[in-house]
Image: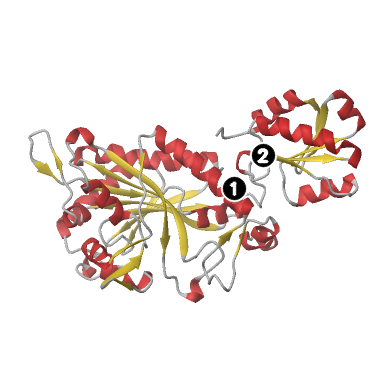
Amino acid sequence: MLEEAKKRDHRKLGKELEIFTFDDDVGPGLPLWLPNGAAIIELLEKFAKQTEEAAGYVRVKSPHIAKESMYIKSGHLPYYKESMFPAMEIDGDRYYLKAMNCPHHHKIFAATPKSYRDMPLRFAEYGTCYRYEQSGELFGLMRVRSLQMNDAHIYCTEAQFEEEFKKVNDLYLKYFGVFGIEKYVMRFSKHNPAKLGQKYINSPELWKKTEDMVRKVLVNLGVNFVEVEDEAAFYGPKIDIQIYSAIGREFTLATNQVDFAQAERFDLWFTNEKNEKERPIIIHRAPLSTHERFIGFLLEHYAGNLPAWLSPKQVAVLPISDKYVPYAQKVVDFLKKADIRASFDDRNEKIGKKIRDAEVKKVPFMLVLGENEMQEESVSVRKHGAGDVGKYGLQDFINFFNEQLTVKL
């Protein structure tokens, strides 16, 4: 198992597959995404956005910095100050790099009047945040200082809370099915009454009420969960999702949080059916964590063999000699018109080496082209890790390829 874990180390695979890198001139914990990594990010975002749009989310955008006054209002200063980069002095005001998206989204909610007819309102953003992790805690993509978060905030009435919280958990389970995550535990993180006013907002009645609400949803869902004291967010209870990769390595992937404090702090309200002002309950959720942590997990979970829909390069076209390069270009053009990510290897190398190199790069499909293929306008297909799977006409291969995809984008 230890040997297998070494082979699957995302830092090793990230280098071999040219996905990400770090550079001393950029700084520790600040990953640079190479073209392959950027392609994976784009595919994950497209998948998440399609899923969220179908679930009734709307997209918002927020800046990477904000004034100190907003973080004082939210309570992140002083509760979260040790995880934030030092303030910058600009035009006589102090600004902080954004460590979380929540306060920005609350300001967006407050920008226009809301009524009960607008609720629930679900704001989603792949927001870039910056957190000051201690140098000794940095670890590949798992602990970084720049992170792109699959974030969203749901503003709902108390009556809508259980259904909305359930929908968020259903979304987690859907994603687990897509990525083959079979083992997971939901950690129900509660406050510590002895630390009210220090680590946690000093509202004992609201803590009890919201923790009872979360527990009720988890019990009704019948999911596997454990209760843990003194690990809640400062503004409310949360669920942390512990998942396990194919070799059993544990990851803290995502979170689903209840917030009973921010609506009052930001004076958020909507007009209820009695034409009275009412505070929304806020749910924070990030089912796909950050690009950094989730891609790190996926590399280890799949041992770098990403499913075809998520692979930066889906098809390598391999002509056996220069004579077949024009046909290889024709094949690539045909595949690209079908939205298949393909390229051809025109190096002056033997076909055996081209195949080995494509296997090392973990390209899902390889198309070998020779005289017969050119004359027949066909392709001889190899599947990564499985060898030859037969000869196909070009359109037949596209049909075969599309049948292999577990996610359609």
Q: Quadrant of residue 199?
A: bottom left
Q: Describe residue 247's horizontal placement relative to residue 228 as left or right.
A: right
Measuring 22% from the left and 55% from the top, which residue is drawn there? 262
Residue 18 - label: none
At label 2, which amino acid type do we have?
Arg
Please report contact status of discs 2 and 1: CB closer than 8 Å, yes or no: yes
Name the residue carrying label 2.
341
Question: For the N terminus, which image quadrant?
Answer: bottom right
Question: For the C terminus, which image quadrant?
Answer: top right
N-terminal-most mark, 2 or 1: 1
Name the residue carrying label 1.
39
Element type where label 1 sits in the image: helix
Measuring 7% from the left and 34% from the top, which residue is drawn there? 274
Measuring 30% from the left and 42% from the top, which residue is drawn there? 217
- Where residue 336 sits: x, y (%)? 68, 34
Q: Describe residue 117's horizontal placement relative to residue 330 as left or right.
A: left
